[in-house]
């Protein structure tokens, strides 16, 4: 998309959001369960109990992770017709509806958590945002939430903010797993024209961003399901918008002089992120591919900084980078408080 060299690239994950009060992958489902209406909780209990016969929502211990549950539901959907001579009392439509209600409840909760995070005062977050702006950095965020979107862009949010304008020279927020304020064509159609703007794609593949960054409310009881990639083991990225996002992720990594991994664990099952990161670091040494199949002159290995309390996360990232990294085994808040970032300009 853009041939501009970005000297600093941030790769952020759930560890950043966790410092703002958002749940982790491990405790998300038990916390979300408390927010479900009785009908949704009852329907989902039956699904979970099918896969985990000893499941008891009254106890925290037996809960699967959200990633595990959604992956099991996807396997159920993929093999629904192949494992039974007839649908019986439970249909594939009912399974799809229960998954949709679960994800919608999650999206609604994350909108509320964003409000809480922005109301609270986080000096470390202000410092981080100031540094990102001052460096005109590219930020690759695998989070759906809208905290960084709000603080980086506010009312000036546009398609360039998300890296969909090749002329942009400012800070960009690239979100390869989608965003809570992105909506696909049919879903976005009822939204008021002045509150949405196109990101890319055409027809049913068109994607729009919603501004201001809040959950759209319908007077007709319509549910606006955002364009987010569900946390499953075998993720699916369909349409031209996601293709451009992954291309841009590779592009900014390929020419970076410094890459900072902040609260990004690179889970074992996240093969897509692992592959795309590997492409970027490979291109630093061998040159970025051009459209004619030849390669640009390589820019050389970047300096890599990893900030995470987990040594295992560091080992996984180092394995993808392929060379030594500077590791700070601490929380993001502590690292920034200890002047891990340059002074804002």
Image: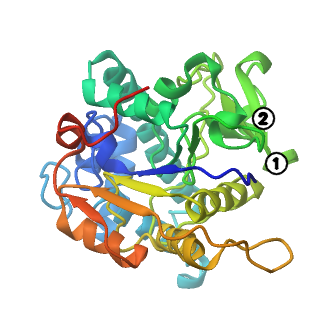
Identify the residue shown where x is 47% and y is 46%: 103
Q: Horizontally, is 221 left or right of 207 in the view?
A: left
Q: Is residue 108 visible from the viewing direction of this image?
A: no
Q: Position of residue 248 (x, y in %)?
A: 66, 56
Q: Horizontally, is 126 left or right of 200 in the view?
A: left
Q: Residues within 10 Å of mark 1 (few under 14, many from 20)?
A: some
Q: Position of residue 150 (x, y in %)?
A: 50, 25
- Residue 259 picture quarter: bottom left
Q: Nearer the viewer, residue 326 or 19?
A: 326
Q: Residues within 10 Å of mark 2 (few under 14, many from 20)?
A: some
Identify the residue shown where x is 17% and y is 38%: 338
Q: Position of residue 193 (x, y in %)?
A: 79, 20
Real-space CA distance between mark 2 and mark 1, rounded to the nearest whole angstrom: 8 Å
Q: Quadrant of the C terminus?
A: top left
Q: Nearer the viewer, residue 214 or 127?
A: 127
Asked if 11 appears above or below 32 in the picture, the reply is below
**Contact check, label 2 and label 1, Cβ < 8 Å:** yes
- Residue 67 picture quarter: bottom left
Asked if 164 appears above or below 95 in the picture, the reply is above
Q: Position of residue 340 (x, y in %)?
A: 26, 43
| Residue, disc 2 | 198
Asked if 194 appears above or below 9 in the picture, the reply is above
Asked if 48 appears above or below 125 in the picture, the reply is below
Helix, strand or loop for disc 2: strand
Label ID, residue 201:
1
Q: Quadrant of the N terminus?
A: bottom right
Q: Horizontally, is 101 left or right of 116 in the view?
A: right
Helix, strand or loop for disc 1: loop
Identify the residue shown where x is 21% and y is 43%: 335
Label ID, residue 299:
none
Identify the residue shown where x is 26% and y is 67%: 314
């Amino acid at each position: 998309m853009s041939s501009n060299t970005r000297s600093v690239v941030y790769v952020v994950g759930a560890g950043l959001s966790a410092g703002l009060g958002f749940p982790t992958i491990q405790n998300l489902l038990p916390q979300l369960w408390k927010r479900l209406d009785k009908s949704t909780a009852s329907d989902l209990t039956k699904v979970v109990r099918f896969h985990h016969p000893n499941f008891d929502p009254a106890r925290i211990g037996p809960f699967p992770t959200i990633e595990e549950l959604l992956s099991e539901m996807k396997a159920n959907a993929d093999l629904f017709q192949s494992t039974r001579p007839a649908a019986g009392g439970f249909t594939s439509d009912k399974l799809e509806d229960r998954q949709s209600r679960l994800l919608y409840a999650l999206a609604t909760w994350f909108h509320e958590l964003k409000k809480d995070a922005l109301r609270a005062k986080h000096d470390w977050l202000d410092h981080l945002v100031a540094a990102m702006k001052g460096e005109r950095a590219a930020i690759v965020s695998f989070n759906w939430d809208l905290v960084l979107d709000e603080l980086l862009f506010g009312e000036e949010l546009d398609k360039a903010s998300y890296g969909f304008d090749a002329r942009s020279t400012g800070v960009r927020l690239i979100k390869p797993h989608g965003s809570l304020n992105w909506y696909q064509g049919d879903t976005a159609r009822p939204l008021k024209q002045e509150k949405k703007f196109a990101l890319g794609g055409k027809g049913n593949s068109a994607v729009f961003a919603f501004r201001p960054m809040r959950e759209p409310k319908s007077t007709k009881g319509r549910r606006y399901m955002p364009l987010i990639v569900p946390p499953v083991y075998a993720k699916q990225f369909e349409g031209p918008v996601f293709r451009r996002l992954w291309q841009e992720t590779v592009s900014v990594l390929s020419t970076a002089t410094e890459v900072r991994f902040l609260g990004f664990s690179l889970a074992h099952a996240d093969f897509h992120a692992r592959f795309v990161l590997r492409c970027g670091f490979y291109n630093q040494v061998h040159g970025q591919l051009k459209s004619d199949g030849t390669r640009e002159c390589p820019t050389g290995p970047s300096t890599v900084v990893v900030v995470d309390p987990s040594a295992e996360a560091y080992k996984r990232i180092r394995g993808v980078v392929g060379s030594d990294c500077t590791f700070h085994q601490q929380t993001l808040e502590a690292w920034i408080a200890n002047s891990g970032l340059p002074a804002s300009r």
